[in-house]
Amino acid sequence: MTYSPIFEERLQKVKDCIAFKNKKVVSTFMSQSVAPSFYDDITLAEYMDDTERGFQLYLDFLDRISREAPIDCFNFGYPGAHYAALTLCWWSRLKRPGHELPPDAVWQVEEKDVMLDSDYDTIANGGLAEVQARILPQVMDDIPGEMAKFNSFYGEDFLTYMRRYAEAGYPSLNSGLVCPPFETLCGGRSMGKFFMDCYKKLDKVKAAQDAMMPALHAQIDAMPIDECIIGRWVGGWRGASSMVNRKIWDTLVWPYMKELAEHLAARGFTPIMHLDSCWDRDIERFLELPDQKCIINTDGMTDLRKARKILGNHVAIMGDVPAQMLTVSSKQEVKDYARRLLDDIGPQGFFLTAGCDAPSCSKYDNLVAIHEVAEEY
């Protein structure tokens, strides 16, 4: 399929940045919930529930910022069918704006222990579908409705939405995520109990995680391939270096993240390692990923200067204006932060954006500031 010249130009910038061939930093938009807060006629609830209206508003908001400072690409697009997607990743209930929460309150994960202690053995013995079928009714009320929306947005309509981004001129770095088993089990078991399980029954947890991997590989194999599809997230949340000790990390976290990233790369996708919290202790392990084919996407807590020094031009970096700065700092402070970061690590192989995600209460001028710095640097 042929896309617009502006899309092709921006897409080439993205590819060059991943391969460290870029001359300028790549301007990257990242916020899933901020757009409705700058419009008077739509709530966050309506934005999330009305997929077509919400999707178009997201594109309008990209255009609004891009008229002030060009956006080269975005990291995560309109969060369609987000509730079901996150529930499937984390086996946890999602409280939704306009339903369990006020209409402009951001969605919240309500984590409870919905896994049985025996579920590790059940999963290890081939019973993943059985366990998930028992858990989903505990964490999702309208399973047929939510799953139908999920299967539509990420299934039959997926390429249509991705091509609409491209037709509007915006490459989407991330077109979905792959959730490592560690994260799914942690959400279903609840964080406190799961972390204790990692200490007391490491072998059982590992056996369950091993048994979950074939389904994740099948998920990767089923992903459509198109010029407008660049990468996929490999999620890293509770598995951060700052959260678990090295033995657990080496056994239950890194091997699975690496395996999924390698499979994505082999299929032609760019693995985007979405790294919440601090990963400083193990940053050198990302040298084990395929050279110049991956991105680490941090949230303001990992030391990017250290990461650049260790990783060099092996892995591109995406970050890293902290969320709190976008909400409380002045535009000049945001620009100063971004300039200092670029001065220290350079523009090659660097996507300038918010750390993890710009909050819904971000100041508009601060969002624009990120793209202004990228344009002028």
Image (tube, rainbow, N blue to C red):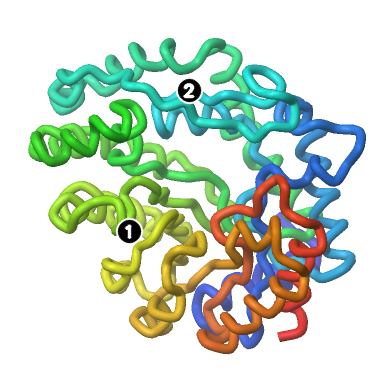
- At label 1, the amino acid type is Glu
Q: Which residue matches tag 1? A: 262
Q: Please report the residue visible at 74 percent of the width from the left and 26 percent of the height from the top.
A: 103
Image spot of residue 287 (x, y percent): 30, 73
Above or below 298: residue 111 = above
Image spot of residue 204 (x, y percent): 11, 33
Image spot of residue 153 (x, y percent): 63, 32
Q: Which residue matches tag 2? A: 93
- At label 2, the amino acid type is Arg
Above or below 257: residue 354 = below
Q: Residues within 10 Å of mark 1 (few under 14, many from 20)?
A: many
Q: Secondary structure at mark 2?
A: strand
Q: Quadrant of residue 339?
A: bottom right
Q: Please report the residue visible at 88 percent of the width from the left and 42 percent of the height from the top.
A: 39
**152 sits left or right of 208 in the view:** right
Image spot of residue 68 (x, y percent): 87, 68
Q: Secondary structure at mark 1?
A: helix
**226 sits left or right of 238 in the view:** right
**Residue 268 in view (yes/no):** no
The numbered dot on residue 119 is none
Q: Please report the residue visible at 82 percent of the width from the left and 33 percent of the height from the top.
A: 53
